[in-house]
Image (cartoon, helix red, strand yellow):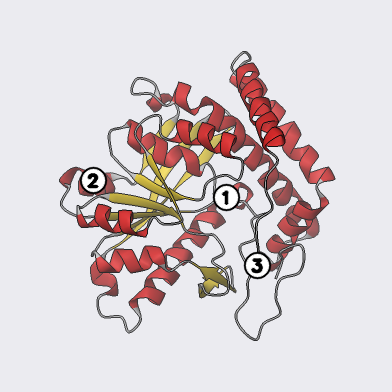
Amino acid sequence: MNVAKPRNKLLDYLAYLAVRLLAMYAHMWPLRSSYDTAAWVGNLLFRIDRRHRRRCLGHLRRSFPDWDEPRLRQVARASMRSLAYLAVEVLFTTRLITPGRWRRHIELVNQAENIRLLLGGRTPLVYITGHFGNWEVVGYTMAALGFPNVAVARPLDNPYLDRYVRGVRENRGLKILDKKGASEMVEDLLAANGAVSFIADQDAGRKGLFVDFFGRKASTYKAPAIMAIRHDAPVVVGYGRRLEEQYRFAITVHRIIHPREWADRDDPVRWLTQEYTAALEEVVRTAPEQYLWMHRRWKHRPKGEPQAGPDGVA
């Protein structure tokens, strides 16, 4: 049994103060300057962070075997910039996504059926997204528009930063549930025809359900599929794609999977998990540079396959 090392409270608090100081300075300068700084930070990380650079490139090589090395490096570098952009965008979200200003920054795409289901209030909904573009702005915007939603998320390791980020996330009504112990609350929510969101492209460990993602088996959490099937909840696969480096996004519904589609399947949990994972892959292929390739998506392997190396690449 692995026992987590106790965290250094002083270092955690200093990191929190640094983020708050950064947020203060970011709001003193034009938005363009913040994006330029984030781009510089992302490019610098690509140069000096060997471990994450190797992981990005390793995942990209296996996912796009026909790409040449210059393209692989270009997309890996852009992926690290994308993460830096997201960090900056979180700082501006509460200021820019408001009832009076959101249209300047958000384009809603293919949302007609989703909004009809939300307004109807007669069916539970399970939302699925991945580490693509800006996943934070999706739930925040929908909550700001008056659609109540609950997101299941793992808390940040730094408790001070976790409280700060949670405050940003919940500023407009989005509620965050800790992934550990959230099952009962999610069950109650869906039973009451509520909506719940999952980031569903995280490695689920050795006991996860292995489904195809970019041509390789990836350990995936079964809970979203189990809950959707139990409550006959349509599964809405969506994302927030960055349109330009000026805080503009397309919040898009890529696919809605209805209960009738899995009703007669021999293994509906596996089928549904594979379907929304395949949908997430289709989303990533639209803009691979906006995916978090440094994430250890293929860390655990099925029995009989070599396990991932120390860089997390399988």
* Amino acid at the residue labelled 1: Ala
Q: Which disc is residue 299 wearing?
A: 3
Q: Quadrant of the image for the N terminus? A: bottom right
* Amino acid at the residue labelled 2: Leu
Q: Secondary structure at mark 3?
A: loop
Cα–Cα span, label 3 and label 1: 23 Å
Question: Which numbered disc, 3 or 2, marks the residue that appears first in the sequence?
Answer: 2
Label 3 Cα crowd, 10 Å radius (few <14 / some 14-19 / many 20+): many
Which is more foreground, mark 3 or mark 1? 3
Vertical placement of 26 versus 61: above or below? above
- Place residue 236 in its image quadrant: bottom left
Q: Which residue is mark 2?
A: 118
Residue 247 position in % (x across, y down): 53, 29
Label 1 Cα crowd, 10 Å radius (few <14 / some 14-19 / many 20+): some
Identify the residue at image location x=65%, y=67%: 299
Which is more foreground, mark 3 or mark 2? 3
Q: Secondary structure at mark 2?
A: helix
Q: Secondary structure at mark 1?
A: loop
Residue 301 position in % (x across, y down): 63, 76
Question: Which numbered disc, 3 or 1, marks the residue that appears first in the sequence?
Answer: 1
Identify the residue at image location x=63%, y=71%: 300
Q: Which residue is mark 1?
A: 287
Residue 188 position in % (x across, y down): 25, 55
For this view, does 211 lie left or right of residue 186?
right
Q: Quadrant of the image for the C terminus? A: bottom right
